[in-house]
Amino acid sequence: MSAEHATPRPDFDVIVRGEGPALLLAHGAGGGIQGNFGLVLDDLARDHTVIGPHYPGSGATPVATDPIRLDDLADRVVAAAVTRGHESFAVLGESLGAAVAVRAATRHPERVTALVLTAGFAVADPALAMATQFIKVLGAAGEWSALARLGCVTCMSDTDEAGYSAPELDAVIQRFQEQITPGTLDHFDLVARVDVRDDLARVSAPALVVIPTGDRLILPDTSRRLADGIPGAEAVELPGAGHILGESDRATWLRLVREFLAGVGPHPDRP
């Protein structure tokens, strides 16, 4: 690894659970480890050491003082595992975290043994770019309730949304608003700037790309293009699933991830 890509000391708040092969998590914009992975953490930790770093402004990680750089974010996510004694690991990236995972894999190929990318993108398509702009405008104006409603519309599938009564949907929106992190606008500023298209062909690790076909924030074709760009990537669709996976879709996701990781051997450069 070159000095340019040397692993920095992390300053992120990190959740660590379980024992076994290391599994590094990269969460989405405006979220956190609990928000993105909380419902599967215990399951994944049954046979993995799950390492979940929080980006600036999420968890207990301080808000960024400058615009977040993808290279720096990827390096610090990797550092969360390396400084805890894990020399190599699979990376699970969700939404923005998929781009973080891809950049981590190309900057630290000797460490990343596999990628699992869910509802991911290489560059924002027009729909995501528009949603990102709305989120930034609403957040800057302090319209957090409206931002939460936009988040629910874009992140829930048609089926999930139709299953709620009006009072139940209001409660979901309220919970969504309560989970908005201080770093949300910084995260979406990065979403607007991310472009890992040139990284894709250089990914050497096995990759599983999970595509929720009911996603209204990151369109399925955008995730398909992500999969198409990674040599040998396995693409699996979750029919009708939204950006935030429902209970049954999450169970399917867990099965797919477990089967994929079970078939991935140790890093070829390591015993």
Image (tube, rainbow, N blue to C red):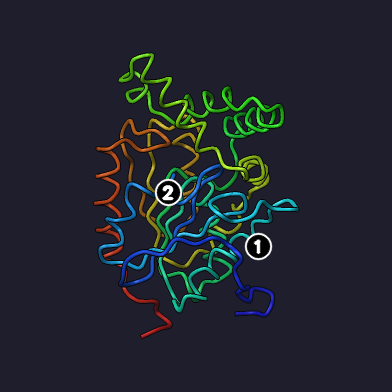
How many residues crowd mark 2 within 10 Å: few (<14), some (14–19), many (20+)? some
Residue under the point 51% across and 44% down: 31
* Residue 175 percent location from the top left of the image: 45, 31
Q: Secondary structure at mark 1?
A: helix
Which residue does the image show at 46% across and 37% down from the upper left? 221
Left-right relation of 8 to 218: right
Residue 176 in the image: above or below residue 202: above
Q: Residue furthest top?
A: 166
* Image quadrant assignment for residue 8: bottom right
| Residue mark closest to the camera, 1 vs 2 | 2
Q: Which residue is mark 2?
A: 34
Q: Earlier in the sequence, mark 1 or mark 2?
A: 2
Q: Which residue corresponds to the image point at 51% horizontal and 46% vertical from the top-left? A: 28
Q: What quarter of the picture does the C terminus occupy? A: bottom left
Q: Residue furthest bottom?
A: 271
Circle 2 — which element?
helix
Q: Quadrant of the N terminus?
A: bottom right
Badge 1 crowding class, 10 Å Cα cut-off, few under 14, some 14 to 19, many 20 or more, is some
